[in-house]
Amino acid sequence: MFKIIWNKDDVERLRKAFAQELDLVITDDPNEVPSDKVGIILDETDLDKVRPILELLAIEKSQVMFQTQNGYVQFSVQEMMYLESFGEDIYLHTKDMTNQIIKQPLYQLEEILRPYHFIRIGKSFVVNIAKIRYIRTTLNAKLDLELMDGSHLEVSRSFVKSFKHALGIQKKEE
């Protein structure tokens, strides 16, 4: 048997996910769980059902350390919107509209951030797919992405197929 304990702040989101996908019940029995937490007790057979949710939570809480001009800086994956290469500089754009210059090549950052659902959308851009609000088709078989902060990025033609595949929206090839 496994015992999983979360902060109460995460409970409502988890409750909805559990109710829809797993048909599980969350309890806040004070005999089983500390007073500031909400716990779920699962049988070992349920672990595979819960694993995707646990992985999502781990990603949401993840921090990544980047090298900058002045040393190292740590960012929450949830704060990061996209990375942009401009000449020799890589700019990390965050949800609070700040930019940080990162001193690593974009291809290395792409590899580091891939497990956190970042994907390359052009020669100069890597985007956090969790921050995409809308995807619209444009001229010349490109895609326009509107991010949660209202900014727009373009998926270049050579990256459209891999982008759609990563999102699971690629049509089957005939």
Image (cartoon, rainbow, N blue to C red):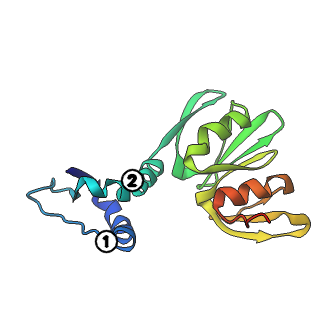
> Residue at the location (78% across, 65% down)?
144
Residue 110 horizontal side relative to residue 156, left or right: left
Residue 87 picture location, percent across and down: 84, 36
Q: Are marks 2 and 1 in contact (CB under 8 Å)?
A: no
Residue 86 picture location, percent across and down: 81, 41
> Residue at the location (34% across, 73% down)?
19
In the picture of the structure, the residue carrying the numbered disc 1 is 23
Residue 132 picture location, percent across and down: 64, 63
Marking on residue 45: none
Residue 100 picture location, percent across and down: 65, 41
Relative vertical location of residue 14 with respect to residue 19 in this rendering, above or below: above
In the picture of the structure, the residue carrying the numbered disc 2 is 51
Q: Name the one closer to the observer, 133 or 119.
A: 119
Cα separation between marks 2 and 1: 15 Å
Q: Name the one closer to the observer, 36 or 107.
A: 107
The image quadrant where one finds the C terminus is: bottom right
